[in-house]
Image: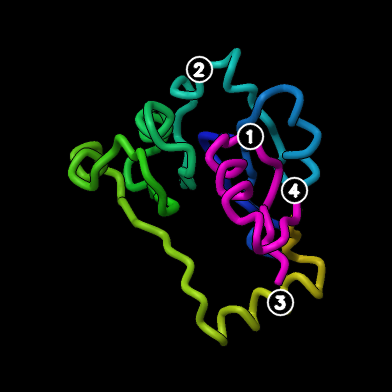
Amino acid sequence: MASDIWAYSSPSWGGAYVIGTARAVNADFVRDLGADEVIDYTTTDISELRDIDVVVENAGGAASVRSLRTLRPGGLFLHVAGPGLDVTEEQATARGVRFQDFYVAPVGTDLENYAALIDNGKLRVHVDQVFALEDAAKAHELGETNRTRGKIVLAL
């Protein structure tokens, strides 16, 4: 499931108003993840949005350029690591926007914190499919489609 703007929040996490983008068929799923509003990116040009504080960009390509246009001066363009980003830090800076690459490293204490958030219901993870390790190539192919809902898991 490709999306242009992604942010996860909970009222206990600062009360952010979260706008998610998805195809209409996935709107309820995105709302269930915590979005306050869902925009169908196939029918609405999200670059018309204005004064967004933070964009969590994970779609890449032309979507990243549209997402950059939505940010208020001083806003944050948070690039979730992945290929195909059409926005550079220099472009963001030229628009008066902060740029940050976001990487998740498997650090023990971070993983413990994530586990606690999951246990407390503050972070939910949706698993799309589970593959046996010997089917890792199939799992990778599925991931390349950008049409999954949630995570793909390899079982050991």
Tags 3 and 1 in contact by the CB under 8 Å rule? no
| Mark nearer the N terminus (4 vs 2) | 2
- Along the horizontal axis of the image, is 88 left or right of 73? left
**Residue shown at the point (57%, 51%) measured from the top left:** 137
- The answer to which of marks 2 and 3 sits earlier in the sequence is 2
Q: Nearer the viewer, residue 111 or 122?
A: 111
Q: Pointer 2: what residue?
A: 45
Say the numbered circle drawn on residue 115.
3
| Residue topped by disc 4 | 128
Amino acid identity at mark 2: Asp
Neighbourhood count class around disc 2 (C-alpha, 10 Å): few under 14, some 14–19, many 20 upward? few
Please give the residue where the numbered disc 1 appears in the rendered image.
147
Q: CA distance from mark 4 to mark 2?
A: 28 Å
**Disc number at residue 55?**
none
Q: CA distance from mark 2 to mark 1?
A: 20 Å
Look at 60% across and 56% down and name the residue there. 136
Q: Residues within 10 Å of mark 1 (few under 14, many from 20)?
A: few
Seen from the viewer's position, the closer of residues 90 and 110 is: 110
In the picture as drawn, the residue positioned furthest to the bottom comes out as 109
**Magenta region, residue range:** 127-156
